[in-house]
Image (cartoon, grey):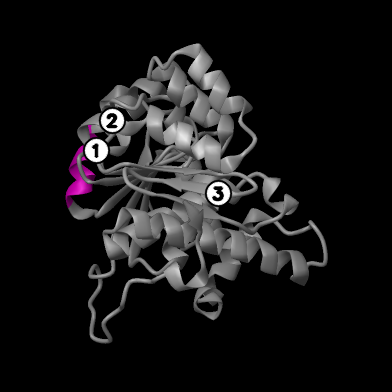
Amino acid sequence: MRFITKSQVRLAKRESGSHKGQNGYVLAVGGSEEYSGAITLAGLAALRSGCDLVKIIAPKKVAWAINAYSPDLVTMKLKDSNFKLKHFSIVKKSMDRFDVLLIGNGIGMDNETKKFCKKTIKEIKKSKVIDADAIKSISMYDAENSIITPHSKELEYFLINSKIKKPIIEKINNEKNIGKKSQSIKKTAQKFLGKNNIILLKGKVDAIISKNRILLVKGGNAGMTKGGTGDVLAGLCAGFLAQSKESLQSAINASYYNKKIGDILLKKKKGFSYLASDMVNEIKRIKDYS
């Protein structure tokens, strides 16, 4: 268990003669009429990370708002105002062309939506990044080949859904030392981690927990409590994963750059006035931080 350094951050090599699609496609599923910005930020972060294409499946009003905001994101527009079980077949068919599924950003907690998230995550076997409300919809027995990116409350939902005993959850919640907390999570989630899953626990210090390793990531600042910064992190995970196909390395890269960008913006804006959308725009300088 140790803090990562810049030397452990490695971007996927991009061939000078590469063609469209060779650097990864991300299918992003999320958004609701209340939270249209979350999936937009996540999609743009994935695209800025270097992958070739991001397509967003979202309710119609959300998708039109995304198109108005950015011409770079492709959208599929659902007629319903929220995700339903019937939309699983659309996602499953679409995934034939995509390398990574990003799911959960702004998706909401409607009962039908939760069922959709659970079924999609359980039955899509390709690489996934699971964030926000999608994490609250599943247990550790539902996912494989995934990076989940919870904050502490989302992790608590996840553990409750997984039927973990209340004293164990309380012990994890109450532990202030991030190293000891990570060890407890690793021990509790061994079966989950054994299915090629990774937990990227967001916090003052991020903890990246895999089957065999715990890595801690310092950096960031109090300005990153703003809404949307976690969506940027999830998007970075998905974009890096689409390019490299390496889950642990993608989580390392995403956590490192997300915190680094927050610290750069704190200096540039001379305070906490920066927004999650500023973080997305700063990703274009990502190689300057390598």
Mark earlier in primary sequence (3, 2): 2
Q: List the residue tagged with mark 2.
A: 191
Count of labels in the image: 3
Mark earlier in primary sequence (1, 3): 1
Q: CA distance from mark 1 to mark 3?
A: 21 Å
Nearer to the camera, 276 or 153: 153
Q: Are marks 2 and 1 in contact (CB under 8 Å)?
A: yes
| Residue drawn at the location 55% of the way across and 80% of the way down | 288
Q: Main secondary structure of the magenta part?
A: helix
Q: List the residue tagged with mark 1.
A: 195
Q: CA distance from mark 2 to mark 1?
A: 7 Å
Which element is circle 2 on? Answer: helix
Nearer to the camera, 147 or 217: 217
Q: CA distance from mark 3 to mark 2?
A: 21 Å
| Residue drawn at the location 37% of the way across and 30% of the way down | 189
Mark 1: which amino acid?
A: Lys
Nearer to the camera, 279 or 290: 290
Q: List the residue tagged with mark 3.
A: 206
| Residue drawn at the location 51% of the way across and 71% of the way down | 6
Question: Whole-percent x and y of residue 67?
Answer: 48, 54
Q: Is residue 9 visible?
A: no
Question: Quick check: 212 left or right of 45?
Answer: left
Which element is circle 1 on? Answer: loop
Question: Whole-percent x and y of residue 236?
Answer: 45, 58
Is residue 48 positioned above or below 41 on the image?
below
Name the residue furthest bottom: 16
Which element is circle 3 on? Answer: strand
Mark 3: which amino acid?
A: Asp
Magenta segment boundaries in residue numbering = 89-96
Mark 2: which amino acid?
A: Lys
